[in-house]
């Protein structure tokens, strides 16, 4: 069965410290992988997507994600959190035989001064 | 960057009433989608739409739901007789190519919060 799991519903960090948001997927095939972010009262914005050109993907606002096929993971990282990073982050998976994207449950990132 | 716009941002309706949620996709996009998120639950796929036809729909998208592109710019989701469990945030999305293409990016609107009383 195809699924995606975000391991943390909430993550709290101090400004300037690293961020790690975890995502694992389950699929028989190589999926499409995305991270979307949702700020309050805003739409879902694409942070980055895995394109198979490289396992380390760089996105907007200093975020990166590393695709690890052996671990079926696509964790999102940022070296130094900023207050403006506080938002809900969704790991999203697409599969070759469907239009349907499957969303993780989301991780709410809080950044403290 | 171009945006998908959704109106209204909040909609309150009585159970059994019909509601229409409106979306204006990005102008050169050809593929359109509705997703919803019930409070505390995952964002779920409802339907995809292309060339004035439903391409794919989920088991949630039953006969109470319909979609339409009434003119060249709007994309609507109609719920004929709303139920309490239809209360959710509804997201519209669009893309230039179908989501089934590997790594195709969807552009999402900011959502319409539907409350059924």
Image: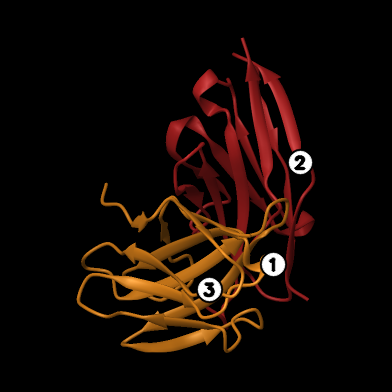
Disc 2/disc 3 C-alpha distance (Å): 35 Å
Q: Please tell me in which quadrant of the rendered image residue A69 appears.
A: bottom right
Query: Are labels 2 and 3 assigned to the same chain?
Result: no
- Circle 2/circle 3 CB separation < 8 Å: no
Badge 3 marks a residue whose secondary structure is loop
Judging depth in this view, the residue of A71 and B102 nearest the camera is B102
Q: How many marks?
A: 3
The subunit carrying tag 1 is: B
Residue B13 x/y as whole percent? 53, 62
Q: What residue is disc 1 on?
A: B85
- A80 shown above or below A26: above
In the picture, the disc for residue A9 is 2
Residue A81 x/y as whole percent? 58, 21
The subunit carrying tag 3 is: B
Q: What residue is disc 3 on?
A: B17
Q: Colour of chain B?
A: orange
Residue B106 x/y as whole percent? 43, 62
Q: Could you classify mark 1 by the number of other residues whose Cα lies within 10 Å: few (under 14), some (14-19), or many (20 or more)?
A: few
Q: Residue at x 51, y 81 (%)?
A: B80
Q: Colour of chain A?
A: red
């Amino acid at each position: 069965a195809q699924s995606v799991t975000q391991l943390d519903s909430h993550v709290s960090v101090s400004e300037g410290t690293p961020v790690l948001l975890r995502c694992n997927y389950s699929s028989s095939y190589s999926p499409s992988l995305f991270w979307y972010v949702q700020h309050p009262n805003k739409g879902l914005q694409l942070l980055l997507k895995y394109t198979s050109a490289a396992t380390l993907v760089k996105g907007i606002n200093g975020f990166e994600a590393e695709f690890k096929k052996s671990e079926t993971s696509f964790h999102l990282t940022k070296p130094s959190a900023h207050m403006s990073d506080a938002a809900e982050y969704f790991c999203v998976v697409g599969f070759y035989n469907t239009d349907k994207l499957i969303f993780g449950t989301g991780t709410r990132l809080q950044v403290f001064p | 960057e171009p945006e998908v716009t959704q109106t209204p941002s909040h909609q309150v309706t009585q159970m059994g009433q019909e509601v229409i949620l409106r979306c204006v996709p990005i102008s050169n996009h050809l593929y359109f989608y509705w997703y919803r998120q019930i409070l505390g639950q995952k964002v779920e796929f409802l339907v995809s739409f292309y060339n004035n036809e439903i391409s794919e729909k989920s088991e949630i998208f039953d006969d109470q739901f319909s979609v339409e592109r009434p003119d060249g710019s709007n994309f609507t989701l109609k719920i004929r007789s709303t139920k309490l469990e239809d209360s959710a945030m509804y997201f519209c999305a669009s893309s230039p190519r179908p989501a089934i293409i590997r790594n195709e990016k969807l552009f999402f609107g900011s959502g319409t919060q539907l409350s059924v009383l």
